[in-house]
Amino acid sequence: MNIKTIKNILSFHEKYWETHRKEMRRYKAAYETNFWDEQGVSPYKDTQLQVQVSEGYNFIESYMASLFAKHPAVVLKSGLQNKGNAAKAGFIANEFLEKSRHEIEAASRMALIYTHSFLKLIPNASDVLLQKVLPVAIPPWEVILDYDASRWDLQKFVGHIYYMTLEEADERFGSKDWSGMSKMSTEYFYKEKMEEYETPSSTFEYVKIIEMYDMVADQLVFYSPNWKEDKILEKSPVGIPFKSWDGKPAIPIVPFYFNHIPDVPLEGYSAMKRVYDQIFEMNIIRSFQANAVRKASRQYLVKKGSIDADQMAQITAGIDGIFIEIEEENMDGIIKPLPQNPTPPELDLYYAHVTGDKDKGSIMAPFTRGEATKVSATEAAALAAYTSSEIGRLARERDAVIENLTKSYFQVLGLYLSEGDTSLIYIQNKLQPVTAEDIMGDFQVYASDSSSTPMSEALIKGQLLSNIPTLIELGVPKDLVLDEVVRVLNLPETFKAEAIKQYMMKQVAAQAPQIPQAIPNVPGLQNIPQGIPTSNQVVSNPSVQSIAPLLPGGLK
């Protein structure tokens, strides 16, 4: 891939996201409840109230609350080639995923607010092998895609755009003649303001780096438009360093899509887009109502000269039972209330229609938003099943990201292990070494509790509890039922059947009568221990000494 090709690809990418910038800013402002700040300065801002609703935040977070319940985890199984050690790799993957929960959730939010997002694995300076790779969530405009590809793994190229300080760039690529950029110019949402508010300084200058993966030629190329020589910064001598278990080049970037455009699979679709127009209208209506309420004060017209200043003060004081003398013969027409224009009833009707349209744009049942509904138990169960199935589809997309992130982590970590790094980890209380062959396998990766959500878990718990009598009638041992209830409800391990049996045995042993002393004058029995041994002790160590205290009257 030459520099001309890179420039053409970069130019198309920047134009594409330039046209979507205002749209992305609107969605971001709606989520952050900064709606009016995004609309610009109004000439009536000082005299008119501007009210905004938090429906954008509620809409996105209702999805997040329904998608995430536990720490992400995976289950690994050996593939057809039986390469790698599934036990070691599974332990390493779950250790990594447990520390990646915040990044996965951050990528999920961006995938809902914007069109999609990504997770990238970056190197981390650490002496501990399992901490040398960290995930970071990145927005969609920082990743260059081949939109002509019909699948993620069929792309001809993938790129990542990021920024480094001059010091970091000199350390990474050597000292070069850079043209620095200001901090604001690196921000996607505020680039149009950079000339007005900020100029580069020697302390905080940045350079733009394009990290391009050529999947056809197996090349990793670095380019920066801020290098005045306008050449390729660096080309990896070994091609793309990250490889899959079968030797194919791999990318340390994982896509996160909840929805795709059908005819352009790599172009995502924003969930916020479905309800933004309704949020816009709700903010307009609420602001109109707020200004109308402020103007709905009680005002009166008074006939000039009929009431003097003292009498007016007595009236406005609002004293109960006060008598005010006036000299007018006819009391009619002295004071009249100023008529008020009522809020048109169409406004409330329109607001109800807008709210209904917003709710239709969401696949969530009303009770997930905390709304009380007058539905029967059967209808509520049907709504819960519908919501669970729709959320389950999004959960499958989430699980696919977790599975792909695990595979990508093995590919990046395998590079460090192949370079000679080793690590010792505890697996089932045994210290075991980890090699590249252990994690570079053709594993079948499954997200733990695949497609599970808080709502689906609640349904499973309810079904289990309601079916306990049926299970016992069918002959399922009570101990097995108890163990399953403890597992599904996440109860303490001390509630399991075996733990309860051991506890009961200890209680029986503690309440049994104690033998005052060892049996005397019997050869070999002078050292019988005090007290009655438990049944486990008798079975594990059958002897005269252990059985004697259990006999009536002792040993005779």
Image (spheres, grey):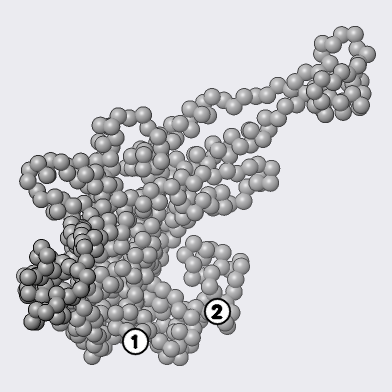
Query: Splitting the image into 4 quarters, where does residue 463 fall?
Result: top left
Look at the numbered discs 1 and 2 and tell me whether their residues touch, using CB distance below 8 Å. Answer: no
Q: Give me the residue at 8% from left, 70% from top.
A: 555
Where disc 2 sits, the SS reads: loop
- Figure check: 336 above or below 265: above
Instruction: Say whether residue 339 is visible.
Output: yes
Indicate the quadrant containing the N terminus: top left, top right, bottom left or bottom right: bottom left
Q: Where is mark 2, residue-wise?
A: 204
Q: Amino acid at mark 2?
A: Phe
Q: Where is mark 1, residue-wise?
A: 127
Residue farthest top in this picture: 329
Q: Nearer the viewer, mark 1 or mark 2?
A: 1
Q: Nearer the viewer, residue 300 or 44?
A: 300
Within 10 Å of the Cα at label 1, are there few (<14), some (14-19), or many (20+) other Cα atoms?
Answer: few
Instruction: Give left or right: position of 254 versus 472.
Output: right
Query: Splitting the image into 4 quarters, where does residue 437 fall?
Result: bottom left
- Residue 534 is situated, as x and y percent measured from the top left of the image, at 16, 67
